[in-house]
Each structure stands twice: as structure tokens, then as C-alpha cells.
Image (cartoon, rainbow, N blue to C red):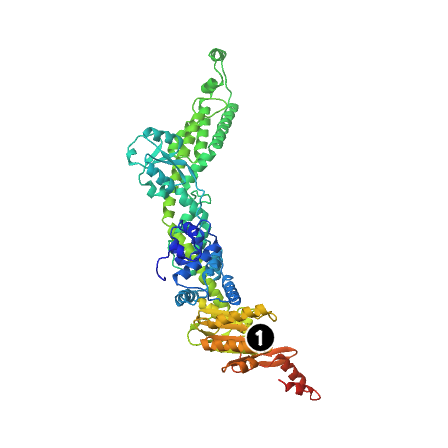
Amino acid sequence: MEGEDLELESVPGVGAKTAAALRDLPDPEGALRRGDVAELAAAPGVTTGRAARIARGAVRARHDDPGGFLATDRAREVHERVLDLVQERAVTDYAAHRLETLYPSGVASRIEEVRELTERAMGRDPDPDVLAALEGVAPLDSPEDVQVRDRCLATADAERYAAAQEAVPEVSVEIVGDARDLAELARGYSTVVALDEAFAGVDVAGDVQVRPDALDRPAEVVPERTLAFFAANRERIRAAVAVHRGAELDAPVDCDALDDALDALADDGTVVGDDELDRLTDAVDDLDAVVATAESVAEERLTDAIRERDVTIEGADLLSLVERGAGVDSLLSRELADEYAAAVRAAREHVVTELDLTEGEADLAERAFTDQPTYPVDHDEDAVSRLREELTAARDRRAARRKRELASDLAGMRAGAAELVRDALELDVELAVARFARDFDCTMPTFGGEGFAIEGGRSPLLDVPPDEVEPVDYAVTGPALLSGVNSGGKTSTLDLVAAVVVLAHMGLPVPADSARVPRIEELHYHAKTQGTLDAGAFESTLRQFADVASGSATKLVLVDELESITEPGASARIVAGILEALHEAGDTAVIVSHLAGEIRDAAGFDVTVDGIRAKGLEDGTLVVERSPVKDHLARSTPELIVEKLADGADGDFYDRLLEKF
């Protein structure tokens, strides 16, 4: 199936319901092929964990991988533990989940696919600045709560109406019949976008735009959609930019232009950094306060003028003013005309200066304070309202234009930004592998030959720092017995072999100076049995080994102290029989046993017995050579203790005991 298109339902774990959810994605097949866990998790009802399982199933489907490599619980535990070690070195949750798609396989094409990633990863430098930048990277969100209420789309066509509702759900779509309906909409919306060519040339009051191509340019009709997307993801995108710069990756978008565009975007999706828009916004917000202050300025100027002047009115003039019903306004007009004009001029200048009005706006502002004297000085509310309407309209026009411009710029970078983030997340996957390889001093294994050969192997499963693990050399061809004293390292040697084989078949590096492993289809690792089994469990165990021995798959078998399943004499004969079957099948096996000598004697072929050689006891502590010695039956702990007691003891008691070994 490698290289062919994926049918969603052909992926293991993908039923009809999940397939329907995945089809909501822009490119579900591509996401499956890439193993893009984040993209798959964007499908309705698909969690990140489930997305990882789906991606892993897609990998198996592409490579015709039947699975079943990890044939026992202990083999699966080893895989989980080594995978955890790699995942722990991922910075992002995405990379940790993406690494879950790595599994041991017997299919060469899958192993080679991951080896390519691994070899690329091992050339990476896990730079601390890049790792720090990765902390801010995450899969991009798509805001779904964008609603635009100041404009609508209008059409007379039912099909176009349905298409508009689907293409631009953020904006109301209205059915109209004629220009009168358009005019009615224009009274309720600041902007009406008519989708029908038939409305071209219609003269309607208000902002009515005839744009038959509007649905093809959603960023222009609803710039808020694009702006909301980038506002919601701004920090993630910026972090991805920092990753690319720090790692010197080729970016799929102009990062400088993207940075500049993001600088112009506020958290709420509005445009910032535009001086003219800021001026108009401040003018609208501050208008009432500035006008009130201007009144105070004028009144203070006029009051001071009145206090500084002696105004004399002759009796006949005063009588004439009273007869005409004149008040203080007439008095001001007659006696303080110049002073009043100066006060009004100060008020007008205050408004123009404080609001930073343009020449045309200043003309409207002057009308807010008339030349007709009044006391106290008061503004013309109608004139102020007209100025407010003009400033508000100018602000909204400027904001709408800047939104469209910025959205147009960002829309052209959206695909690049998405790829930028995806590449940063994938880099984290590679860096996790690189850090694992560095921390455990790994190398790439080779495949081929019979059996395995490990030099300088350091088990990653030991609970000690990697640099404190004593290296082990071990090579086996065909079935072999591994002997050794208690706590001498037999189980950790099996763990090392299992870890190397699992990592190699995952396509990952192995913790060794060098390693050659056979290409197998199944790993059977049987952990140490606790206590003697009852008859039913004993029978079940024998059935398991019968299946292992008779199976046609190429395999590696690792067994830890199988003799505990029954009495020692019977155990030796049973293990010998199992070894004979594995030998006839041509499989490689390592069986740890304290009955290695008895098993060798019972076997029908010349079985290899290797041993972890004990050097002796020092201050009660066992000292061993960790690397198994070929064709060496290791001495037991009791023998070492008797030997120590015999050395220098009086009498021949201990010597006689020693002769029994």
C-alpha cells in the first residue's frame, strides 16, 4: 500500500463515524500520510491521544504492516519505557504525541522511513535558545466565535444565499428583491455587500457595495476572520519564527513581513500602530471632554475680561435696553464684543489642538461655538453631534480599510504561517530524538547476519544516570543459555538486548558503541516468573512456548529464569526441549537460567552457555564482569561464598564443600 492513496475506512481504528469526522479536515489523507497528529486532532470528537492511534494505524496501513512485533507483555513494557525516554525529551505536547506513532516493526520500508528521520535528527543541534522558543509553539487554533454585526450580504438568488451562508457564516445574509430592500438594509447596517451583478448602478443611500466576487474573497468581506485567527495564534506563530531563526531553518514565509503584520494586530483582532486611526479614535473618545474643557477656557477668558474692564451705561441707553427686553447677551455684544470673540476663538483653538483635527474637521469644530454672545459660554450641541458623526465615520472607514489591508496581507501568509508552526513542531520531534541519542550516547544500528552483536551497550532501562552505566559487550547466534550469579546483571543484559532490538526496529538509534541486529518479525521477551506455577498456569506457559517454537515468523526469544515454572529437574528438561525447537527453527534466543549446566546436558544439540563471570566478593559485595563470557558456565553465589570461607580456614570442611561444585 506504500505510495498509494489512503482510504479513510482502510485505516485500522477508523470506522464510518470517525471517517466522517476526518472528512471535515481540509486534507485528511495528507494529515494521515504525514502523521500530523495536531491536524487529525482538529477533527470533531477526535482527541489528541486518539489522533496518535489513528496516525499509527495509517502508518501500518501504508506499509502493509501486520503488527504483532511486540509478542509479549514484557516486550511491550520495554517499548513503552524506551518510547517514554524519547518523549521525555520533547518540549511540545504535539511532539510527545507525534512520537507515539513510532513503533517497532518487521517491515523494512517502515524502518527505513523512520531511519531517514533519525539520521536527519542526529545532525541537529539541540540549541537551548531553540528549545526555549519551542515552549511557546503549539498547533494553531481556529476561532469559531467571530461574529460581524455592522455589515451584511444581500442577494436575490436562493442558491447564492445558501452558498453565502456556508462561505461566510460570520456575517448575516439577507434575501432582497429590489433596490428598496437594499435601502432598507442600508439603514440598519453600516455596510451592505450586494452579491448580484443586477444591483450594479443602483443609487441607494448608505454604504452599499455591489461585489459579485465577494464569496471568492472572504478576507476582504470579513477581514475579522483572518485577523481573529492571527490574533489567537500570534504568540505561537512568533515562537515558531524564533525557532526557525534560532535553528536556521528555511522558512516558508517572509518572517520579517509576518512579524511586521503581527505588530499591527491587537489581542482583540483590531488594528494597532496606525497613527491616523489612533488620532481619529482618540478624537471620538475625547470629544465630549474636550468640548467641556473648551467651554471652561472660554468662560474663564470672558470672566477675566469682564473683571478687568469698567463698563459704563448711560441712563437712556439702559432704559432702551430694558424696553427692548435685552439681557446680558446684548450687553456682551455691545460692550465686550472683542473680548467675547477672543474667548470663543480660544475655545475653538482648544478643540482643534487637543483633538488634533484636520482642516476640514476644524471647520466643523468652529461651528460648535458660535459668534452669537452668550453667558455662560455654551456649545452648539447640533454642531458637536455633526463633528462626532464625521469623526466616527472617518474612524470607521479608516479602521475598515486598515482591517482589509492587514487581513489581505495576513491572508496571503496564512498557509505559510501554518507550515511555519508545523515545521517547528516537527523539528521538536527530531530534537527529541537527537537529545535521546546524545544523552544515551547512541549510534545507528545495522541489520543483517545471524543473531545479534552489541559492543559497548548501555541499558537505558537501569535506574542510574546513563554515564554511570557499565558498558556490556554481548553477541549471540542461535539459541544460547546465559548463566551468572544473582544480581550479576543477567536480567539487565536481557533488557539491553531487548531495548536495542526494539529501538532498531523502530528506526531509532541504540545506546551502544555499535550494534548489529537481525531483522525479525516478532520479539518474545518472557520476564521472570514469580514462584512455581500451578498445573493450569504451567500448562498455559507450555502452550505459549509451543506457539513460539512452531510459529513461522522470524523471531528473537528472550527468557528470564524459566526454570521457576516447575521442579528443577523437570524444568531443565523442558527448557532443553524449548531450546531444541528454537534451534531447529533457526531462531535466536537467550535464556537466563541457574540450571544452565543441567539444561546443556539435557539438550539434544551443542547449546552455547555464556556466563557473567564473577570476580569474587569484596567486603561482602559481589564483583562481576558485566559482559558475558562466551562458552563459560558462571559460578554461583554460594560457590563464591564457600570459596571465600575456604581461603585460610582451619580444617578441610570448606574444601570438601567446594569440591561439590
* 623 relative to 26, above or below: below
* Residue in front for this viewpoint, 182 or 391: 182
Mark 1 residue element: helix
Badge 1 is on which residue? Answer: 563
Expressed as whole percent of the image width and height from the top left, the position of residue 214 reads 33, 40
Horizontal side, residue 529 vs residue 362: left or right: right
Residue at the spot 39% in from the left edge and 66% down from the top edge: 109
Occupied quadrant, residue 468: bottom right
Residue at the spot 33% in from the left edge and 43% down from the top edge: 216
Expressed as whole percent of the image width and height from the top left, the position of residue 283 reads 44, 35
Occupied quadrant, residue 177: top left
Expressed as whole percent of the image width and height from the top left, the position of residue 67 reads 44, 64
Horizontal side, residue 64 vs residue 616: left or right: left
Kind of residue sitting beneath label 1? Glu
* Residue in front for this viewpoint, 589 or 387: 589
Instruction: Evaluate whether residue 48 shows in this view.
Output: yes
Expressed as whole percent of the image width and height from the top left, the position of residue 532 reads 61, 71
* 213 relative to 544, above or below: above
Q: Quadrant of the C terminus?
A: bottom right
